[in-house]
Image (cartoon, coloured by chain):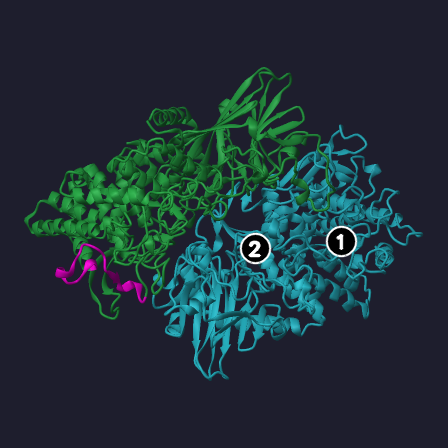
Chain colours: A green, B cyan
Amino acid sequence: MNRWQETEFHDQFYMTMHSPRGANASFALGAKDDGGGFLHDTATIPEQEIFIGVKKGNKITCLPFFKQADSNGEELYDQGAEAKKYENLLLKYDPSVVSRKLGFATDSWTAPGMKLEIATPVDGVPEPGKATAAEIKKAIVPAIPVKLTIDNRDGSETAHGIFGLKDLRGFYSAADRSPSELLGIITADGYGFAMDAAKYEGKVTMVGDFGPKELFSRVRPELYRLAPMGGFIVEVPPGETVTVDFVLGWYDDGFVTRGERTCKNYYTNYFSSINEVFQYAVGITDELWAEARNHDRRLEESDLNEEQQFLLAQAMHCYYASTMLFDDGGRARWVVNEGTYMMMNTFDLSVDHLFYETKYNPWAVKNQLDTYVDEYSYYDTVHSMDDPSISYPGGIAFTHDQGVFNTFSPAGYSAYELTNKDGCLSYMSHEELTNWILSAAVYFHAFGDKEWLERRKGVIADCLYSLLNRDHPDPSQRDGIMDFDSDRCGVSAEITTYDSLDASLGQSRRNLYLAVKCWASYLAIERLLTSVDQPIYAAAVREAKEAAMICAKTIVSYYDEQLGYIPALLDGKDRSAIIPAIEGLVYPDQFGMSEALAYEGEYGFFIHTLKKHFTGVFKPELCQFSDNGWRLSATSINSWMSKIFVCQYVARNILGIDFGDDQIVHDRAHAHWWKVPCHKCPGIDQIFWGYEFGRGFHYPRAITAILWLN
Amino acid sequence: MNRWQETEFHDQFYMTMHSPRGANASFALGAKDDGGGFLHDTATIPEQEIFIGVKKGNKITCLPFFKQADSNGEELYDQGAEAKKYENLLLKYDPSVVSRKLGFATDSWTAPGMKLEIATPVDGVPEPGKATAAEIKKAIVPAIPVKLTIDNRDGSETAHGIFGLKDLRGFYSAADRSPSELLGIITADGYGFAMDAAKYEGKVTMVGDFGPKELFSRVRPELYRLAPMGGFIVEVPPGETVTVDFVLGWYDDGFVTRGERTCKNYYTNYFSSINEVFQYAVGITDELWAEARNHDRRLEESDLNEEQQFLLAQAMHCYYASTMLFDDGGRARWVVNEGTYMMMNTFDLSVDHLFYETKYNPWAVKNQLDTYVDEYSYYDTVHSMDDPSISYPGGIAFTHDQGVFNTFSPAGYSAYELTNKDGCLSYMSHEELTNWILSAAVYFHAFGDKEWLERRKGVIADCLYSLLNRDHPDPSQRDGIMDFDSDRCGVSAEITTYDSLDASLGQSRRNLYLAVKCWASYLAIERLLTSVDQPIYAAAVREAKEAAMICAKTIVSYYDEQLGYIPALLDGKDRSAIIPAIEGLVYPDQFGMSEALAYEGEYGFFIHTLKKHFTGVFKPELCQFSDNGWRLSATSINSWMSKIFVCQYVARNILGIDFGDDQIVHDRAHAHWWKVPCHKCPGIDQIFWGYEFGRGFHYPRAITAILWLN
């Protein structure tokens, strides 16, 4: 029987990732009958079977994070052996007796006789080179704390708690090099778990075996190194409750990137081995738990409803799984992987992580902006689709990403963008150009970093002229909207971050979604260059301001009274309806130009029209799915969670729309997508009418939900 | 249709491994519709689809090393895309037009319009610290040469050759750091391929794409880094034949072992990057090809029949795939993995690799003997199964292995052996004790290394008293045969290398197979300590000599006239028939005591009896399978290729048995096992009535076939 055949669906069994910061590492758990386990430079959620539970009498009852109850693994190894009878039974808790609570920072599982809790970070990483070594060390220790509590108060004989994972390989004892400090197991793949030897020596035993049944059938359990399961067991005398406080840890001491740049993990500056990681982490678990409970409380006490709290908590858990903090020849370098795709610092994701990062990791935004300018920008020429053979001046643009699978692509080139490629995988020059501008403005607004602005003002001016050239080479023909594609596309055309959507959101040229981002970009440049306050930029400020107004007017001019919305392509023919027309409004809100968003302000006509647009498209027959989920484009079944979250924020907080009782109906639909059909894909972004494709996909981008918490 | 449903079976489609020396690296290819590709610290044969072929017109025809003809991969990535039509067709050569020749060192594939050749080493690695740097460098360069020839002599338009592999990740161009020297692709997993830029610039293009169809549909192929397939294409003008000479290479610069010892790859002392590996290897390909052709010729000109030549060639190809040469704190350390199981220097495999290594890698034998003494020996106590609670003095013994998955186990302990474990996975103390003694004697005989003998004579004496104690603590009750199990077994008993066989070969105590190895071990000690020639060892020499004679007499006394053979367990009850009774005779032959093997010598009665034993069991109803394969134990369907090869050598070369026309009938059965039912498991050792279990298993041990070549 698989979960779809069960009469009652227990929606707490969704996969969640538990991740330290900047280590390309996480621990996944939560889907029923499915495993999970350690990720370490791993693209998809692994399938390590996990055994966490309690043995009372001859029954070993575990949380259902493994495939088959009552199986044993030894025979698979010993090919000649006959099926063996064990006196012990391996059972799964019935789903109905398991309860789960996912907090902002913690994940707790309770079942009769046991409790499992895992805590993960919510705060960011302070700026390397500015924060103290002690602050950095604590923020980037590649370890997270876990508590396993076994309750034997009603028992009349000794119970045993078990924590074990299968598919570990090449494991050895943490005690080998820290004999009186640590009990733990480390594997050949650079991860493991450990606890304080002083506290648990004699009570907890590190074990290696084929599975829980084999383990408990031994005369005396051993750390059997050949077997696939590593873990520990803890003795719990009758009448007692025992909590084992331990940590999961990861370590890779070599060069971990290749291609254009060869970097090490930044944490290697603070920890010289996984044993050091363990010893440090074991010493601060109380502190980590206290912080985690505070974060939990903050979310619980927010005005978010229960579904929104879940969505944000799950998004938070998935973000750090994709983060990497490198030592790049002595300097810190921040990279966020594109989840399972593992493209590095995909710029159209960075612009979404921005909302979290400016609040928690601000230096990381600057860091990405700088590497994009210094390494992953280019100056191109552009063409009109009317005659692609004629090149016109283009200007600065930025690549889609900085490489893939920890392999940096050559400077000026992404891993993703392909010349002469129709649709998905083509260039995103214009989209990424707006992303740099918007990120720069949000960063500057949050920190007023004048030194950075002074250093980058020339780039900002370059961005302005690049935007203008992509509108039209002839100033008199400009309407504020992109009409010229980069020559890097070859015979194909530019696309947007909605790369696998139809033209309503997938095509860049004259796209409404991108047009509103252009408007925001012109405002951003106006704001930034005004702050530079130097005479030579006065003309640029004026041009940016004018372009923003022209852009807004052009967009409004396409409002179709009959349709009741602005069609997605501003070409006079298209009739598609999209929600992300309003997405770009989030940026002025985040870079401090709320006056541009006021219904009574200079752009009031524009904001009013976008509100009309939103109410015009946000209808069951257009931009809502039959399950009440938000449908970004009425002509596609493909919707993006991260972008839904941004647009919800814009609709509520900027356009002032009150969804009333419907709010939670939509939220419940989105929570359902993640908890039920996509339960094996934590944080997955692209959802096809409520479904994912394939198991084990994960994604960091939905952290945009952090906007709700302001 | 899968291959089992084909009406005609083409038996050239078996997987073979192509491996440099000591790099834990290989390249697998050969099974139809199955892929293969790069192994690098990898347990099983990977499933990277391989595209090697030629495009003429709109037809891309490749050797059948990929799953589906006419498939394309792009849509899998671009989730929104509709199925795309390509003008090109991806086809597989019909099996009937493909011909293959596996030589001692080369593997050649010919199909209409193309030829693929790969060369691998046969020679050993000279002794680090004694051979010159130039000699070592050439022997351990982690690269192998490949030739792809495209014949377009009958063409009227340009043809394109292609070499490509899927499931590569994070690739970048070798030219990035060697712009005018190399064309090639390197991946995040530390392997790739490269060629001389001066020779191929402008003719060969490095490409990355989703597959051959997508690649050839581009306006201009690119090295597209996000796509899963990396490779190259070569232009071949009409009327011409072009050969691309290139190399496959591997590199890992970090620490590659963990646990008890932390080592680097020894090649990092000679090559500082994979680019250096490539540049060096590209410069010596002509030399490597010349050597490979010489090795091929040597095998072809030997007196081995065609099937034997295949078996030895295939075994040779699989051996180096499992080898690792480490830099262990400055000293060279040789490790052979137990194939897919990846246990390190499994001693009961080392004693089989011995026959190859003493001839080609002699220092590696010494190296393993020394690490076994210094790190993986132990001194135990023993017990009789009559009363396991009473401990008697045991003596020195050796562990089963030195760790698993590049994780060294704690000194004195293997990864494999488990206390209180019945059958498979129990201790092999006695077996490994004989293995150390026999390896020492073979090594000393081959090299007369007096310095080593002087240093290890005490260990050899310890071995003698350990053997004697395991026979019986009371000298008067000794019969030359093991009766006492190590206390390390706990409540269980010792096993032999035939661990998953029934008691006929699996049980150590009073086992005929092990008894003959005891006899050989006593002779070995006699031989070694006689060579020490120091008065204090005179008694030991005498004791060893006496024990050998007692042992031989005991064994002969169990010959059962009625059965016509010696039962496998010398307990007066067992009636099992086994071939490996004769296995131990190979050692005196290899350590220079042929006088002990002479029918007319001191042990003539013993040798005569073992010959009678062999002819007594080697009958269709006992130790032959129904397909004419050798059946090591009449009571099991589990047979070991490596051991069949040893026993064949003993039967022919030591016992002087002439199999006449039957010889090739047996050889053909064994070749069939590897070529047909086990075609996806190169070098697989354990075969169950002609079949393997599972795909992608490989093993180094069958190199025992090298005995035939003397």
Chain letter of mark 2 equals B
Which residue is drawn at the image coordinates 43% and 81% (left, top)? B237
Which residue is drawn at the image coordinates 58% and 69% (left, top)? B106
Disc 2 vs disc 1: which is toward the camera?
A: 2
Secondary structure of the residue carrying tag 2 is: strand
Residue at the extreme front of the image, as rendered: A562
Of residues B639 and A174, which is closer to you in this image? Answer: B639
Please give left or right for residue B432 compared with residue B127 in the image: right
Sequence order check, earlier mark of 2 and 1 = 2
x, y (%) of residue B271? 43, 58
Residue at the extreme left of the image, as rendered: A535
Residue B584's mark?
Answer: 1
Of residues B512 and B698, which is closer to you in this image? Answer: B698
Identity, as a three-letter code, of the amino acid under mark 1: Gly
Quadrant that contains the C terminus of chain B:
bottom right
Is A481 in the magenta? yes
Magenta stretch in the rendered image: A470-491
Please give left or right for residue A41 compared with residue A229 in the image: left
The residue wearing badge 2 is B323
Residue A185's mark?
Answer: none
Is A383 in the magenta? no
Identity, as a three-letter code, of the amino acid under mark 2: Thr
* Residue A161 seen: yes
The image quadrant that residue A25 belongs to is top left
Chain letter of mark 1 equals B
* Residue B411 seen: no
The image quadrant that residue A83 belongs to is top right
Quadrant that contains the N terminus of chain B:
bottom right
